[in-house]
Image (cartoon, coloured by chain):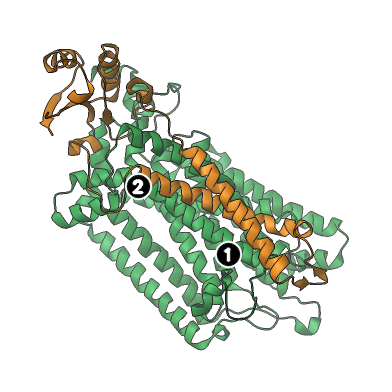
Amino acid sequence: MSEKVIYVMYDDDGVLKDGAKKLVSKGVKISDTFSPFPIHGIDPIIGVKNTRLGIMSFLYGLTGLTLATIGMRFFMIDDWPMNIGGKPSFSYLENVLSFVPISFEFTVMCAAHGMAITYLLRNKTLPGMPAQNPDPRTTDDKFVIEIRTSENSIEEKDLDKLIKDTGFIEIDKKTI
Amino acid sequence: MQKEAAIREPLILGHKSYHDITEDVCRPIEDKAPKMWYILFGIALVIGLYGVGCILYLLGTGVGVWGLNKTIGWAWDITNFVWWVGIGHAGTLISAVLLLFRQKWRMAINRSAEAMTIFAVFMAGLFPLIHMGRLWVGYWVMPIPNQFGSLWVNFNSPLLWDVFAISTYLSVGLVFWYIGLIPDFATIRDRAKKPVSKKMYTILAFGWSGRAKQWNRFELVSLVLAGLATPLVFSVHSIVSFDFATSVIPGWHTTIFPPYFVAGAVFSGFAMVQTLLLIMRKAMNLEAYIHTKHVEYMNIVIMVTGSIVGTAYITELFISWYSGVEYEAYAFINRATGPYWWSYAAMMTCNVVSPQLMWFRKLRRSLLFTFFISIVVNIGMWFERYVIIVTSIHRDYLPSSWSMHYPSPIDIGVYIGTIGLFFVFFLLFARFFPVLALNEVKSILKGSGQSYKESPDYYKTH
């Protein structure tokens, strides 16, 4: 069965939000929105869950800290304990103070880069990827709601009626 | 949408719409570059190439071409390094610390301030690299398994901490900057008409489409990166100060260094931001977005950090006497009254006196005066590092080793050259990149725009 995607365009983020609220309260499932900047408060309305990238960042940071600790313990204590100014490197704990700066820096480096790479992969944004927004104006000043007929049990005619009340400026239907 | 007090000055002047913001930021990129851009770019390029020539000569001949001697083994190279790192502190402070504090005025300036930061850290990183003399073995600073036996770098050394600090700072700063740039590149991509620029911006925009989930992640990533970058800003210059503070040279061996260096870095960084932005807003017609209020906020930061720096100078002076260590006391008396008194005087005037003028509302809201002071502060901060480094070591423990430092033409050439290269990078950025975080600015239009301030219902009726 062919699926239809309906793109409803608005020229204001507030109008889109009100419209989305109305549609959702009537039982319409909105699959996505496209906007030039984050529309605050749209996520709970259309059912977008909060990202867990923050947890990932913490885990990457923890990895960095572990690596830095293992690494410096190996280099400075196990493999080649240098005697610096009569202060030999006997144990990690006795020397830990001078390892604090690099442990910190390496933690931050892993947390930041790990999160950034995960972010780009999860977003499917990588160098050279084609744009997926339905209309080039959505990165300028237009806001679009995407509704898929396959995700909705409501008839297309009824959908059109519901959408009509939301104050949109353009509507576009695509069969995929 | 956040509500904001009506008595606060609007951050975006004029009755702008979302589309106007896109137009205002993208037009300078899409139009032909003005003649002035080519002239400035040409000058910067010539100076930059001269610097590259000096660096190549230095690498070919050896570090002996600098005006160093047995007593003064560190002079302009490390002065320039610290100066550039310091300048490279404003960008991340603006975008990270001010993001955590939810300061909306940062949005108009964070993009270019971060670009400036990255280019400044490039220039800073150049100095330790060329200081090695043999640039091609620069990778030896990394703990890489090697064939020299178990030869590792020394993790107890502040110089190695610096390697990690600067490389983390540069790479995290770059990532933070680029993640913010992606949605704005998408805007330019979707407007581009010429095939070449369309192709270029398509690659740069990474296929961004502005989906709800993408924005959800974007906001969290920005916040977490800001949270990570904030301690990074403070740690990096603290670690730079450890290069000196952990030594045993009178004048360097002080516990006040980390906070004092960080304040100094923010101080000089904001001054450089002012210098660049005051020109850029005029040249690119961005007066509606970067206006007197932004300049005033930045001047207040300059005033506060300048006062911290001034307090640190005086504390240092007092403690050198109070410590009862005669070497320590001499180091400071010599700074103020010795053969380098003029650089101490320049530092004191530029860094302690000039920011205090910002207490006057009229002065801190005057763009011309701000521009003048920003240059004064940059000169002063260069002298601060020069005073700390050269005057502390030019009087060695043995009077027979006492010496003076005279910069060689290569010293001067390398320094001036990095300024040229910095401007080459910045001008390229201003020409091809969105200089304003335009999509972020759109998100504050309804709360902080002039139209909203004048009548809160403006955007409901228009």
Q: Residue at x 39, y 71 (%)?
A: B48
Q: Is residue A80 left or right of residue B429?
A: right
Label 2 element class = helix
Residue beneath label 1, please?
B163
Q: Colour of chain A?
A: orange
B244 or B239, nearer to the observer: B239
- The chain holding disc 1 is B
Q: Alpha-carbon neighbours of circle 2 within 10 Å: few (<14), some, or many (≥20)?
A: many
Q: Residue at label 2?
A: B181
Name the disc covering residue A127, or none. Answer: none
> Which residue shows up at 34% across the image and 37% down it?
B214
Q: Is residue B388 visible?
A: no
The kind of residue on which mark 2 rests is: Leu
Give the residue at x 56% y 76%: B131
Kindly state the secondary structure of the residue where label 1 is placed: helix
Q: What amino acid is at disc 1?
A: Val
Q: Quadrant of the C terminus of chain A?
A: top left
Q: Position of residue A164 (x, y in %)?
A: 15, 15
* Residue A87 coordinates in the image, percent (x, y): 81, 68
